Amino acid sequence: MIRDGDRILTTRPGLTLRPERPDDEALTFRIFAASKALDFDGMPMPQHQKDFLLRQQHVSQLYNWRYLYPGLEQWIIECGGEPVGRLIFSNPPDQIILHDLAMLPGRKGVGGGRIVIRDVIFAEAIRCGKIARASVAPHNPARRLYARLGVTELPMRPDSPMIPLEWVPPALRRPAP
């Protein structure tokens, strides 16, 4: 991960990350709501009720992460200076945790997420000598991206609807038997 002042640079020209600011609240909610569209679109309720539930989930998720991970890092992904997504991760002593990576509609599937995972999360895992972990919903199309990046899906736990993921840096990998 290459930091330049308060920004994170990537290997793709023009694709950078900047710290999330309080005035990004509307943007971060828009990104969150777009990332949950698959879960909420089919719900038989008025849009204002869906929006209320989304806002509650958005606030409670952030509150929970901030409580559990005091060093939580929240970044806005920009392409050419325009916001295109969001990255939230933490770096506790034993691992790198990718909590959320979400792109705005129209920015999914064009490689920005792949670059951010590789240049930020994997680079930090390599630098720190830690395993990178995340989780993904079984229906999330991002599973294909993680598989292409060499991220391993672990068995689901009975107490969670999410698939746990991990990526082991080359220096920590055990040789095949």
Image (cartoon, rainbow, N blue to C red):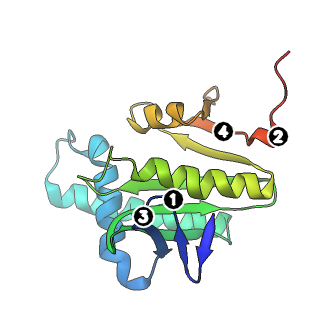
Report the residue at 45% width, 59% height from top. Answer: 12
Considering the image in quadrants, where does the N terminus appear? bottom right
Report the residue at 78% width, 58% height from top. Answer: 128
Label 3: element kind:
loop
Q: Are marks 2 and 4 in contact (CB under 8 Å)?
A: no
Q: Earlier in the sequence, mark 1 or mark 2?
A: 1
Q: How far from the left and from the top, in percent, is residue 141?
A: 38, 35
Distance between the alpha carbons at the discs numbered 3 and 1: 6 Å
Direction from residue 62 to residue 1 in the image, left or right: right
Distance between the alpha carbons at the discs numbered 2 and 4: 12 Å
Q: Residues within 10 Å of mark 4 (few under 14, many from 20)?
A: many
Label 2: element kind:
helix
Judging by the rendered image, the residue that carries numbered circle 2 is: 172
Q: Amino acid at mark 1?
A: Thr
Judging by the rendered image, the residue that carries numbered circle 1 is: 11
Judging by the rendered image, the residue that carries numbered circle 3 is: 13
